[in-house]
Amino acid sequence: MVVDDEPGMLSLVERAVRTTGFRTILCSSASEALQRLPSDRADVALVDLRMPEIGGLDVLRAIRQAQPQCGVILMTAHASVDTAIEAVKLGALDYLTKPLDFERLRQLLTGVEEEARRRAELLEADNATAHRLELCGMIGRSAVMQELFGLVKRIAPHARTALVTGETGAGKEGIARAIHQYGPRKNKKFVTINCSAVVETLFESELFGHARGAFTGATEHKAGLFEAADGGTLFLDEVGELPAAVQAKLLRVLETGEVQRVGSLQPKKVDVRVVAATNRDLRRESENGSFRRDLFYRLNLVELDVPPLRERREDIPYLVAAFVREFADRFEKPIERVSPAAERLLIYASWPGNVRELRNVLERACMLAEGFSLSEADIARCMPVESSQAAPPPAAATRDSGADLETVERDHIIEVLRAERGNKVAAARRLGISRRTLYRRLERHGLLTPGVPAPGSGL
Amino acid sequence: MALNLTPDAEHALKNYLAIILGYVELLLDEVEAGDPRKADFEEMKKAAAAAVALVSQNAEPRA
């Protein structure tokens, strides 16, 4: 992008850089440049310092803010040391005096080109690593997720039933799909039923089908989901919602591999892998009798626990990047990153709704945002109040008993620090440890450098 | 030679000279070694560069 109020200068620069392979965008005023900035994504801008209305330094500031990857070269007919220093301070690439030294200009452009290429290569390399750290589109660089992905790949070829546990929105269905994808049935059907969404009286007919005349309204023979999923995978989401009578029948199907349509005496062989998912503690429910114990053990042969998002906060930046890319594409917006403050907000939120909630928040934020970067305010206004608190308020009650000690300790420290409004002495007293011990813990959990944001800091 | 130019006049003049000089340099890059016009362009460049120097000198005391 070339910005100069003198048209002769614009065409001169265009001619001069023609051989470098750069495409030029010519703007004859600062306001035109600022207007075109969001849509014409320039790699480098050559800006005249002295223009009527808006000066070159202001254009420089605007570009640095809106498009930091765009290098800015200032040019002026009247060089002064002060403006040169000011320009460099503001992040200008260089400061050229008119008449322009074309040789120098071309050198600068070559540098910009190399930098852009290097960045593209880096991005590509990063994408390649990301691919290795993904499973069927799920991002999980954290150790807990890598372990889970490994387990999925190991059991997928063999397991006939599996139980996926985890909080709402943690990605249970994704794991179920991955088990299907990595198993021998990946070309067969993957059929989903959400057990909490089916009317109780229709369960049997849904799952197993019915014969004509089995009940009022059963005017045709109908195959159930088990038959539909024959050869493939049936995913029973929210399996804990299954009524007791259906639990018994489901167990029978799992054991015999035969389904019987409602109102029919003819058993039918089916070959279905069943992956069930629940956010409830079925082990406890099977112990106190609200879920059939034999069915629980049958499903539980392989249990995959999907960790909640707050236990794998290190994945959040990658998830955020992926979601922002997705929604920027979908909404056709030039958003390409989140501001550091916004990222901190996202990383330290409690996310009771896990990845799904994070995704929803970013979808809303991207829908409403303008410009290239999502700011802290963009994120905050899209975040439900309970998520924006760094840790769940009534701690012990909501804490997942599966969380490891480190995570519990880390969350607890954050929570106490917030309660004490960042006062470390008071926090240490409440934790029953010395201030020095608290600092050591903070350091160990990597909480020292970015600082646990105090409640008043806008988090 | 001392010119008596206002800062605005000096700035404008320099801008125009920069355009003239810039185009001449581009033309010089394009002409073949044996081209008879080459010498003409050299003359234009020399004059434009001298003008730039003159205007700059005028700016010197204030810088």
Image (spheres, coloured by chain):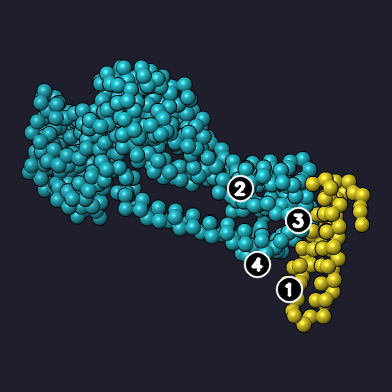
State the mark number for residue A98. 3
Q: Chain of mark 3?
A: A
In what element is the residue under mark 4?
helix
Name the amino acid, label 4: Thr
Q: Chain of mark 4?
A: A
Q: Residue at x 81, y 72 (%)?
A: B42
How many angstroms separate mark 1 from mark 4 (CA)? 12 Å
As drawn, the residue found furthest toward the front would be B61
Q: For mark 3, does the 10 Å Cα neighbourhood hold few (<14), some (14 to 19), or many (20 or more) residues?
A: many
- Comparing A229 with A92, the one in front is A92
The residue carrying mark 4 is A19
Snapshot quadrant of residue A314 = top left
The residue carrying mark 2 is A39
Name the amino acid, label 3: Lys
In what element is the residue under mark 1?
helix
The residue carrying mark 1 is B30
- Comparing A198 with A313, the one in front is A313
In what element is the residue under mark 3?
loop
Name the amino acid, label 2: Ser
What is the letter of the yellow chain?
A: B
What is the letter of the cyan chain?
A: A
